[in-house]
Image (cartoon, coloured by chain):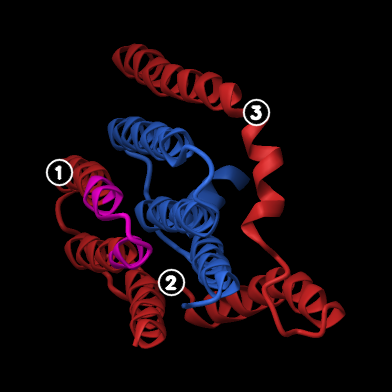
Chain colours: A red, B blue
């Protein structure tokens, strides 16, 4: 049951990502992106994180809505050239193969019967650097606001 | 129970789709949205790691991820407005040609 839901969510995410490249106007691109985010939140729900699912949806859709308002207000819902789908498919397959190859090798070495890439192995690395996340967060927000101020001054000149 | 590796593979697939989309996109806005798709993969991976370990504070990781997304979104809006004011085309192919001039 859960596996079927995960498969549907994965398929929907892949299709919506492809549609984002296929559509030629900003409104439909944003709609496809919203569908992508909704299924992303569904995956969070599957992992028993309802609060994170809704928070993620609010933050991402809120940000995308702001982006859409700015985009449409300054340029209109214009038609633009659609993306190269053949290049998209080729690059996606190559990157996926490169990413999945290490997983398949790890599974083969242990007989492929269990999840040898356990979350536990990632924990020591993440726990030791928790304070760094605060620093990263502060720096990134600083860069964001700083870029707005600097670019705003540049545009006025 | 769904194996952990399935979620990691999903995150990998989403990341690959985002990067491939950014590489093949011909529009600046779509390119930036595909970068968002790639970043979203990190959220899937973080929540999956939390679910399967239940041993560390997921909120710190997610705040860091959302900070990246927020900063990128702000940068997108700023660059977009700047390009609009300068009258620069958002078509990637035309942008490349302007670089050759």
The reply to whether label 1 and label 3 mark residues of one chain is yes
Which is closer to the viewer, label 1 or label 2?
1
Say if the magenta span includes residue A51: yes
Query: Chain ID for label 1?
Result: A
Circle 1 — which element? helix
Q: Is residue B101 visible?
A: no
Disc 3: host chain: A
The residue that mark 3 highlights is A129
Q: In front here: A21 or B98? A: A21
Looking at the image, the residue that sits furthest to the right is A109
The residue shown at (41%, 34%) is: B63
Can you say whether A80 is above or below A9 in the image?
above
Q: Position of residue A2 (x, y in %)?
A: 36, 81
For marks 1 and 2, the one nearer the N-term is: 1
Name the element at disc 2: loop
Q: A31 and A101: which one is in front?
A: A101
Q: Main secondary structure of the magenta part?
A: helix
Q: Label 2 is found on which chain of the structure? A: A
Asked if the residue under mark 3 is in contact with the one under mark 1, i.e. CB atoms within 8 Å, the reply is no
User: Where are the magenta residues, as a range?
Assistant: A42-56
Residue at image position (37%, 88%) is A4
Circle 2 Cα neighbour tier, 10 Å, few/some/many (<14 / 14–19 / ≥20): many
Give the image location of residue A155, x and y in percent. Answer: 33, 19
Q: Which residue is mark 1?
A: A69
Contact (Cβ within 8 Å) of mark 2 with mark 3: no
Q: Is residue B24 above or below residue B46?
A: below
Residue B52 among those drawn in magenta: no
CA gap, disc 1 and disc 3: 37 Å
Work out whether residue A32 or residue A23 is closer to the camera in this orientation and state it: A32
Q: Name the residue carrying label 2.
A: A83
């Amino acid at each position: 049951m859960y596996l079927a839901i995960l498969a549907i969510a994965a398929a929907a995410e892949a299709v919506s990502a492809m549609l984002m490249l296929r559509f030629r106007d900003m409104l439909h691109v944003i709609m496809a992106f919203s569908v992508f985010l909704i299924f992303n939140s569904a995956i969070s729900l599957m992992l028993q994180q309802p609060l994170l699912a809704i928070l993620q949806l609010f933050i991402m859709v809120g940000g995308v809505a702001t982006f859409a308002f700015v985009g449409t207000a300054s340029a209109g819902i214009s038609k633009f050239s659609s993306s190269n789908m053949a290049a998209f498919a080729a690059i996606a397959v190559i990157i996926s193969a490169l990413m999945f190859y290490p997983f398949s090798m790890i599974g083969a070495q242990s007989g492929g019967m269990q999840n040898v890439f356990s979350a536990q192995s990632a924990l020591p690395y993440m726990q030791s650097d928790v304070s760094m996340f605060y620093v990263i967060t502060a720096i990134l927000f600083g860069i964001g606001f700083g870029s707005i101020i600097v670019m705003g001054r540049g545009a006025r000149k | 129970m769904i194996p952990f590796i399935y979620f990691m593979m999903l995150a990998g697939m989403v990341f690959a789709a985002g990067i491939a989309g950014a590489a093949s996109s011909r529009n600046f806005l779509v390119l930036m949205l595909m970068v968002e798709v790639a970043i979203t993969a990190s959220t899937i991976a973080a929540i999956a790691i939390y679910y399967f370990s239940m041993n560390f504070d997921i909120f710190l990781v997610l705040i860091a991820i959302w900070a990246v997304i927020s900063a990128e979104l702000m940068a997108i809006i700023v660059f977009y407005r700047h390009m609009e004011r300068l009258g620069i085309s958002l078509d990637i192919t035309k942008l490349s040609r302007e670089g050759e001039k």
